[in-house]
Image (cartoon, rainbow, N blue to C red):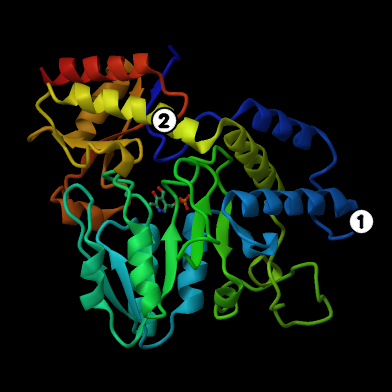
Amino acid sequence: MNEWVYLNHASTSNQKPEATQKAIMEYLCGDRQWSAGRNLAQMDQNHLIWDTRVTLADFFGAKNPKQVIFTSGVTLSLNMILWGLLGQGDHVITTSLEHNAVARPLDRLKEERGIEVSYLACGADGALDPEELRPLIRANTKVLVMTHASNVTGAILPYWECFAIAKEYGIITVLDTAQTAGYCQVHLEDSPIDVLAFTGHKGLWALAGVGGFVVRPEIAGQMKTLICGGTGSSSHSTRQPERLPDKFESGTPNGIGILSLRESVKVIEQLGLDNIRAREEILTQRFLHGLEELPVTHHGTKVLSKTVPTVSITCGDRDCALLSQQLFERYGIVTRSGLHCAPLAHQSIGTYPQGTLRFSFGYHTTVDEIEYSLSALRSLLG
Ligand SMILES: Cc1ncc(COP(=O)(O)O)c(C=O)c1O
């Protein structure tokens, strides 16, 4: 067993694939990272970025690689999308399970642009009824934004059904795949998704600080640019280019992050999402089964097809932060406690403000580590 038992994959992946590590070292030791000037010396960098765009377009089912926009992650992507689309008097629908990456930009947009927000209610197990969307829709509803899976309960939300209803009313649909990219297959082209935001450092096993969004061209045309600046194109003009991806990619790109994304996504494609998921489902099932004998409440679903490998529990009046600390100090087990940047989710599942103790597994988590964690919990709670 490793020195630490890392069960915090919903926050970030702790192990990057060997191929990614090797590529990063080669990049750092070589002369490919020049990026200060956009000239011939950048040919390699440009090639790398284009190649990654092609890899990601294939992975997320976009027709044209130019639809893939690189940013620092889901947070920046969602800010760019929401600020780019929403104006005075617009109405937005979201869910009661959202991360602050959605909730906070919407809160600020309410204050600064007078937008209105409605929340689709989710049950304690994270389930929601897509039909409950219809009564929330108004004449001025512009966007439906929702997370694909809750980072608190792990529940996978029925985005497809919700987005299909939204499309009947011409509403723009935005999906946050922070918790599902690298676990669930998401394809833009054959789906009712207009824009999906992704982050590199979680299930895509890349470095932190890289991610992006994939957008339908007609929606990109409606989005205002949040961040303007140099793109290495149309340099004679002070006007931000309208063409993709330049419209949304100003400033020097995160070459090493983009490289890590390319290498890690290739590894994921070789392993196959189905295999990754099958393995992580076994771990989740084993853990959920073990929890049944313990004095804990599980806030999520036991249906493996409806959850990512994230399990949130509370233990009566026991302080989750203290339990997390004890798991770490006495047993070397890394978990996360508290509100997980998702206060709305805790309000809707009844765990606000104390939060939950969250265990989240990854492809490299072992059954031994699951058993060890269950026995550590047994000793702490016994
Ligand atoms: C559901 C969800 N959305 C958004 C984010 C933000 O991701 P990032 O910090 O990579 O931008 C997270 C991170 O925990 C998340 O779980």
Is 26 above or below relative to 36? above
Which class describes the residues within 10 Å of circle 1: few (<14), some (14-19), or many (20+)? few
* Residue 278: assigned label: 2
Q: Secondary structure at mark 1?
A: helix
Residue 332 found in image quarter: top left
Q: Nearer the viewer, residue 121 or 163?
A: 163
Name the quadrant containing residue 67. bottom right
Whether residue 124 sits left or right of residue 208 in the image: it is left
In the rendered image of this protein, does residue 292 appear above or below residue 136?
above
Residue 374 in percent (x, y) is at 24, 19
Rendering coords of residue 257 (x, y %): 64, 45
Depicted 89 relative to depicted 44: above or below: below
User: Measuring 44% from the left and 79% from the top, which residue is drawn there?
Assistant: 86
CB of residue at label 2: within 8 Å of ligand 1?
Answer: no
Q: Count the marks: how many? A: 2
Q: Which mark is residue 325?
A: none
State the image coordinates of residue 2 (x, y, percent, origin top left).
Answer: 45, 15
Question: Where residue 304 appears, x then y in whole percent?
Answer: 30, 36
Q: Mark 2 vs mark 1: which is more N-terminal?
A: 1
According to the picture, the residue beneath numbered tag 1 turns out to be 40
Judge depth for marks 2 and 1 and give the one in front.
2
